[in-house]
Image (spheres, grey):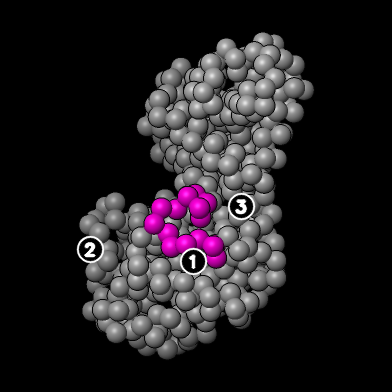
């Protein structure tokens, strides 16, 4: 749960787990979070000590104030148990819906796959395995699936869990002798959403438990959606029987957003926060914040906070001051086309001159197309500017090369792996 993760930045992990491990989120709306703990002592202490920390974490996530209420035993009886505790309040959040997910060439396939399994569940791709680097929108898609299923199938049992939390819950269940309750929670779900499934790899008991949970749900035609930072075949220490099952359905990857998608994300987030950003500011952020969607959205939130705190006009200068911890000197922030070309050439074992030139061997052509794709994705160069980096090729050649790599990324896992490895090499230069 992201709220607890943010709270851990202000207090120790032990403190957070001590007070909130058994606390359930009963209701989450645009203005209120309702909590309940089975411990009377904790129900007395949490409102007095920790509600400001919870509200602060919620404001950081949603840029809006929330009322936080902790129910007493009597209030719980009144409230009723019709609404099951949510594994995460964000499953009901209107921020994380398909409508608010900005679709671009880098995430179009994963978005379409997520929509397909959300309505109706377990009829098309099962399991759905979404993978990509951190901060690109995998969690948003999982929440969007939960939001759609809850809206269209109100009687469905939806369970969302992080891979690491699944392990922690299993350990507690074993220690407290609650294995049966643990299994019922997951094996009776109509839809199971597991974020960061890579964290169960190498943990024998967790993999054993998840293997049987997966089989039970799959055989019962219940929907399973998993996310990871890499495809199943690249997960170290993942049992082969789990690896094959994860590949039974559909694998969908998400790549970092290109310039146009970054621009659309900024506009979308600004509108939702009530910000009217000048075009110069929009383009400045899109050109300079390239790492991931989370960083882009965080930048827009910081601009909002800066405007409210400083009561200052929003322009490029104030934006630079507001997010100076993210922005570096622009001359060093973006990788140069030459750096990208050098890294692609090194990966394929050819010279940069050969990659830029007119060579027509299969390997050289592919490496050149990968380089064009990465320059377009990572930098703000136009198609014409990219063409000039390759002995003045015209923009239609560049467009064709980028389109070919985008198509290959959807069907060829090897190309996805190549792009990810080269991108990591580029990022290692700390530009």
Above or below — where is 300 with respect to 38?
Answer: above
Disc 3 versus disc 1: distance between alpha carbons? 20 Å
Q: Is residue 315 visible?
A: no
- Between 117 and 284, the one lying in front of the other is 117
Residue bearing the label numbered 2:
15
Please give the name of the residue rendered at 47% of the width and 46% of the height, measured from the top-left corner.
134
Residue 286 x %, y %: 56, 31
- Magenta stretch: includes residue 231: yes
Q: Secondary structure at mark 2?
A: helix
Q: Quadrant of the C terminus?
A: top left
- Single out the residue that lies furthest toward the front: 361
The circle on residue 241 is 1
**Mark 3 Cα-neighbour bin, 10 Å: few <14, some 14–19, many ≥20:** many
Residue 141 x %, y %: 58, 56
Residue 82 x %, y %: 52, 85
Q: Nearer the N terminus, badge 1 or badge 2? A: 2
Q: Left of 362 or right of it: where is 61?
A: left
**Mark 1 Cα-neighbour bin, 10 Å: few <14, some 14–19, many ≥20:** few
Q: Which mark's residue is nearer the viewer, 3 or 1?
A: 1
Q: Which mark's residue is nearer the viewer, 3 or 2?
A: 3
Please give the name of the residue rendered at 72% of the width and 15% of the height, measured from the top-left corner.
393
The magenta span reads 230-246
Residue bearing the label numbered 3:
252
């Amino acid at each position: 749960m992201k709220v607890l993760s943010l709270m851990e930045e202000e207090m120790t992990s032990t403190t957070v787990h001590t007070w909130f491990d058994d606390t359930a989120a009963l209701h989450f709306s645009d203005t209120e979070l309702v909590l309940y703990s089975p411990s009377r002592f904790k129900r007395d202490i949490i409102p007095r000590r920790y509600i400001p920390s919870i509200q602060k974490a919620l404001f950081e996530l949603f840029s809006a104030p929330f009322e936080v209420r902790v129910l007493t035993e009597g209030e719980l009886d009144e409230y009723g148990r019709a609404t099951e505790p949510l594994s995460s309040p964000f499953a009901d959040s209107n921020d994380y819906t398909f409508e608010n997910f900005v679709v671009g060439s880098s995430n179009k396939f994963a978005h379409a796959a997520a929509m397909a399994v959300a309505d109706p569940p377990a009829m098309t791709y099962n399991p759905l395995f979404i993978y990509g680097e951190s901060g690109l929108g995998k969690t948003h898609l999982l929440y969007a699936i939960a939001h759609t299923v809850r809206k269209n199938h109100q009687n469905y049992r939806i369970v969302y869990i992080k891979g690491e939390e699944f392990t922690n819950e299993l350990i507690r269940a074993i220690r407290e002798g609650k294995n049966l309750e643990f299994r019922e929670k997951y094996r009776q779900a109509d839809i199971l959403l597991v974020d960061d499934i890579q964290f169960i790899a190498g943990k024998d008991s967790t993999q054993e438990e998840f293997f049987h949970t997966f089989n039970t749900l799959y055989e019962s035609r219940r929907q399973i959606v998993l996310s990871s930072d890499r495809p199943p075949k690249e997960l170290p220490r993942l049992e082969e029987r789990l690896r094959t099952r994860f590949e039974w359905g559909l694998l969908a990857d998400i790549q970092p957003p290109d310039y146009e998608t970054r621009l659309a994300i900024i506009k979308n987030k600004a509108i939702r926060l009530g910000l009217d950003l000048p075009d110069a500011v929009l383009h400045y952020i899109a050109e300079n914040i390239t790492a991931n969607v989370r960083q882009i959205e965080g930048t827009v939130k910081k601009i909002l906070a800066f405007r409210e705190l400083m009561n200052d006009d929003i322009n490029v200068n104030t934006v630079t001051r507001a997010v100076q911890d993210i922005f570096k000197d622009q001359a060093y922030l973006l990788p140069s086309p030459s750096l990208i070309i050098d890294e692609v050439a090194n990966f394929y074992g050819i010279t940069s001159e050969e990659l830029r030139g007119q060579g027509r061997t299969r390997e050289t052509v592919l490496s050149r197309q990968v380089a064009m794709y990465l320059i377009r994705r990572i930098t703000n160069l136009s198609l014409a500017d990219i063409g000039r980096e390759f002995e003045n090729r015209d923009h239609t050649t560049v467009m064709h090369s980028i389109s070919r790599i985008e198509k290959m990324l959807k069907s060829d896992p090897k190309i996805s792996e190549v792009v990810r490895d080269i991108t990591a090499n580029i990022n290692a230069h700390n530009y």
